[in-house]
Image: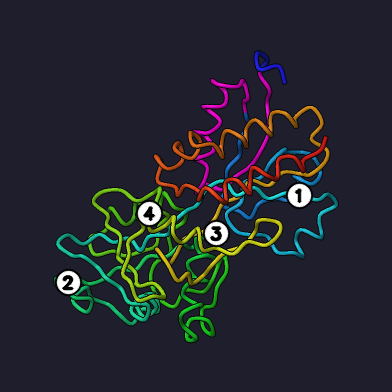
Amino acid sequence: MDESAAVSLEGTTSVETANAYYRWFNQLAVRKGVNVELQSNNLAPDLSSLAAGQIQFAGIDKSPSVQELKALPTEVLAFPVTGIAIAVAYNQPNCQLKLTRNLLVELFLGKIRNFSELGCPDQPITLLYRGDASAATAHFTASLAAVSPIWRNGPGSGRLVSWPSGAAVQGADAMANALEATPGSIGFLESPFLRSPLQSAALQNRKGEFVRPDIKAAGLSLSGIALDNRLLGSSSDPSNGYPIVYLSWMLVPRKGLAANLPAIKISLTYILSGAGQDDSELLGYVRLPADLRQKSLGQLGSIQR
């Protein structure tokens, strides 16, 4: 590719990872002349547009099923690009929440109604949940279902569930705003959207350790995710690190990129570089473990024109 000539790509991503993609492609526009028309939304990714060649990549935050991939007319490759931790965020000064696995489930079942029941000063709890279909909801509820048969056989897991208690909020930005504006509120929020005065609870992992969603603890969880030969997978109950962390991928077609192939390879090479991972980490995302970055980079040679 002639790096002196600008190249335009088209792609989609979720709202939750859009900030990382915007930063990556701002850097790529300056450094490599790769521009992008990026659409972000809260809906499930439209893989059919990718397979039909209407876009060159799709950022996804939940691993597609084998059936979904087999239904596509074109094979796609999945490149892990970053990770996201989901915090149990709350607005209650002078309170350092530590939630056991059971307490976390009881909280979102609506059985705990006051901060005093959690060892904090008296304050009624305003429970908030995502009312829109989202990957955050899918991963958060999968974690609750993994540790609680009551949750698994009740609300269950998925991008959209019937919450037993609380008030609905539409979107990650709206969740952060609602938590900030509501003293005594608790909700779940992706770590890139966490901001003062909100705090994140320490959650008990499978080992019994209480950990917060910092970079080190979240990265440890990413290292424990078992991926299949497509580099897809998730862990709803990791034994190490922070217990609610998930991967985000860039999907690209194996064939049919034609003249866009060099730009896609240059983009992924930068995103998976140390500098690219620094970019996302500065925004609150979780950098990929080194071995996973190498596996992701190793797939670049499998993309064909």
Q: Earlier in the sequence, mark 1 or mark 3?
A: 1
Residue that numbered label 2 is attached to:
120
Q: Earlier in the sequence, mark 4 or mark 3?
A: 3
Q: Which amino acid is tagged 2?
A: Cys
Q: CA distance from mark 1 to mark 2?
A: 49 Å
| Viewer-side residue, 145 vs 271 | 271
Q: Residues within 10 Å of mark 3 (few under 14, many from 20)?
A: many
* Mark 4 touches mark 3? (CB < 8 Å): no
Q: Nearer the viewer, mark 1 or mark 3?
A: 1
| Viewer-side residue, 101 vs 22 | 101
* Mark 3 touches mark 2? (CB < 8 Å): no
In the shown orientation, is residue 56 left or right of residue 162? right
Disc number placed over residue 135 in the picture, else none: 3
In the shown orientation, is residue 113 left or right of residue 274? left
Vertical placement of residue 290 versus 278, above or below: below
Q: Which residues are magenta?
A: 6-35
Q: Looking at the image, which residue is at 51% across and 78% down?
A: 155
Q: Which color scheme does this rendered protein use?
A: rainbow
The N terminus, quarter of image: top right
Residue that numbered label 1 is attached to:
76
Vertical placement of residue 82 versus 304, above or below: below
Q: Residues within 10 Å of mark 4 (few under 14, many from 20)?
A: few
Q: Which amino acid is tagged 4?
A: Lys
Q: Earlier in the sequence, mark 1 or mark 4?
A: 1
In the shown orientation, is residue 180 left or right of residue 60? left
| Viewer-side residue, 83 vs 110 | 83
Q: CA distance from mark 1 to mark 3?
A: 20 Å
Q: Nearer the viewer, mark 4 or mark 3?
A: 4
Q: CA distance from mark 1 to mark 4?
A: 31 Å
Indicate whether residue 158 is drawn in magenta.
no
Measured from the top left, where is residue 223 in percent x and y?
A: 50, 58
The C terminus, quarter of image: top right
